[in-house]
Image (cartoon, grey):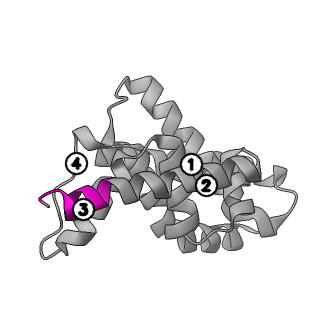
Amino acid sequence: MTSDEFVRRVEALRPTLYRVCRMQLSVAADREDAVQEAVLRAWKKRGALRDESRFDGWFIRILINVCHDIQRQRGRIVPMEALPEPPVCGENPRLARLREALAALEEKQRMCVLLHYIEGYTVKETATMLGIGESAAKLRLMRGRMRLKEMLSEEVFGDV
């Protein structure tokens, strides 16, 4: 992979990288550090990538590992729901509630839901990125959907 191709692929992944980091790390500076460290690690190991068509999954797996490293190093393993980010001005309240519900999911389920439903990766690609089997990914997706439905329907039907 040429350096120009590497840069182009990383730039195309940028929005996804920050969404993945947002689900893992609550501090914006940590998210910036994670993306930069992932780019550095991927650049150094780009020769180890055998199939360039798997670049996205390979890179996201590196990013997830970097996020875990940062959590361990900083000792800031804080549930995302404990430190919600303020809603963006003019953000739809339903979208803000969905974001909060996603943050409240268990990490394993949250990452599967994010990669599959929000980023659009297949179940197989999601499983590969997370280093799990397809059946485990499907189970996490099912449990995540059920938990989201439960959390979001409590808000809608809570007063009835």
Cα gap from disc 3 to disc 2, whole angstroms: 26 Å
Q: Position of residue 135 (x, y in %)?
A: 74, 51
List the single residue furthest toward the right.
50
- Circle 4 is placed at which residue position? 84
Left or right of residue 133: residue 62? left
- Three-letter code for the amino acid on which mark 3 is drawn: Arg
User: The magenta stretch spans which residues?
Assistant: 151-159
- Report the disc number at residue 97: 3
Left or right of residue 92: residue 100? right
Q: Position of residue 71 (x, y in %)?
A: 43, 31
Looking at the image, is mark 4 or mark 2 nearer the viewer?
A: 4
- Report the disc number at residue 60: 2
Proximity of marks 3 and 2: CB atoms separated by less than 8 Å: no
- Three-letter code for the amino acid on which mark 4 is drawn: Pro
| Marked residue nearer the N-terminal end (3 or 1) | 1
Looking at the image, is mark 3 or mark 2 nearer the viewer?
A: 3
